[in-house]
Image (cartoon, rainbow, N blue to C red):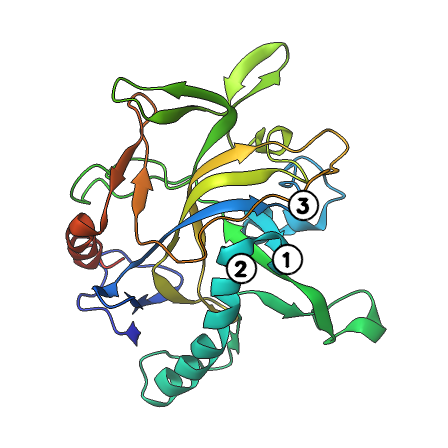
Amino acid sequence: MIEKKKKEPTKKYKCSFVDIFFNVGTDHKKKHGWFSIRDVELSAGVADKNDASDPRNAFDGTRLQLQTSLSKSGAFGAFLAASNPEWARLFELRKVDGTIVVGSRKWHPLLQTHVSEESDNVAARGQPLEDPIIRLKIDWKPFPEGLKGFLAGQPKTQFYDYRKQYVDKDGKTQYELAKVEVNGESVLVNDDNLHLFVTKGSIIREGTVMIQSVVSSAQWVSIPITALKMVVEPGPDDGFVEATPTFGNKQAVTTVTTTSNVEPQQEVTVANASEIDEALAGLGL
């Protein structure tokens, strides 16, 4: 469902936002889009921000991304592919009734299904992709302090190392925050060094994504998919993955997972989702 926000944001943004809600099964109606994902293999590494030859560095929007494909993303990719026609249908309806102000902006799909019209390969422009591309937004900014509950002030995207597991006092498997070696020192991953950790062939073994708004930017009307908690198994140095990951349950799960830099991860189940919905709506998010 796509609806106008109940409250206008108190802060002015360059983009405009419209709310998205999901019905999942029969019990979870009109929920914000918080979904768990598993065993998603990345088809490209994260861009090195200091590599001037990488065209992704031309814009933060193309640089701050995790990239996978339909064939490598299992249930998550199937969910996006199934949802894409509905997004196209609702876009046309909400454009007509004025919920989404389109103007000269172009519609952007949930996953890239065709070669870009700006591709250097002129002959391939507009042609269908054999394996559609899926991109997740990396957002280092924290959730607003005004948000109720444990999310307030925490970075939206956080990376954990799947290889560094431990069992907490409750017997649950947890993961250490991801670190990389920089100048002989082990440091937490950040915007400057993430490319050393998230390489081609890396696998998101566990993760949470947020799909909460239609965004009208300068050129596009899109639905960003924001990476939140990412438990990653880095790919081998040569970027080659010997075995295809085993994909888990194909049912979308409305479980919210978040973490703190000093506390073990905390899970908030559907029973608490209404509180999160209310807090987000109150902030105009």
Can you say which quadrant of the picture contains the N terminus? Answer: bottom left
Q: Which residue is disc 3 drawn over?
A: 44
- State the separation of the CA atoms marked 1 and 3: 14 Å
9 left or right of 159? left
Residue 107 position in % (x across, y down): 51, 76
Pointer 1 residue: 71
Q: Position of residue 83 (x, y in %)?
A: 45, 71
Q: Residue at x 31, y 35 (%)?
A: 154
Above or below 224: residue 263: above
Of the pair 248 and 21, the residue shown nearer to us: 248
Q: Residue at x 48, y 48 (%)?
A: 248
| For residue 25, above or below residue 176 | below
Residue that mark 2 sits on:
77
Q: Residue furthest top?
A: 184
Q: Position of residue 255 (x, y in %)?
A: 30, 48
| Circles 2 and 1 in contact, beta carbons < 8 Å | yes
Q: Is residue 115 visible?
A: no
**62 left or right, relative to 86:** right
Residue 133, image quadrant: bottom right
Q: Amino acid at mark 3?
A: Ala
Query: Mark 3 and mark 1 in contact (Cβ < 8 Å)?
Result: no
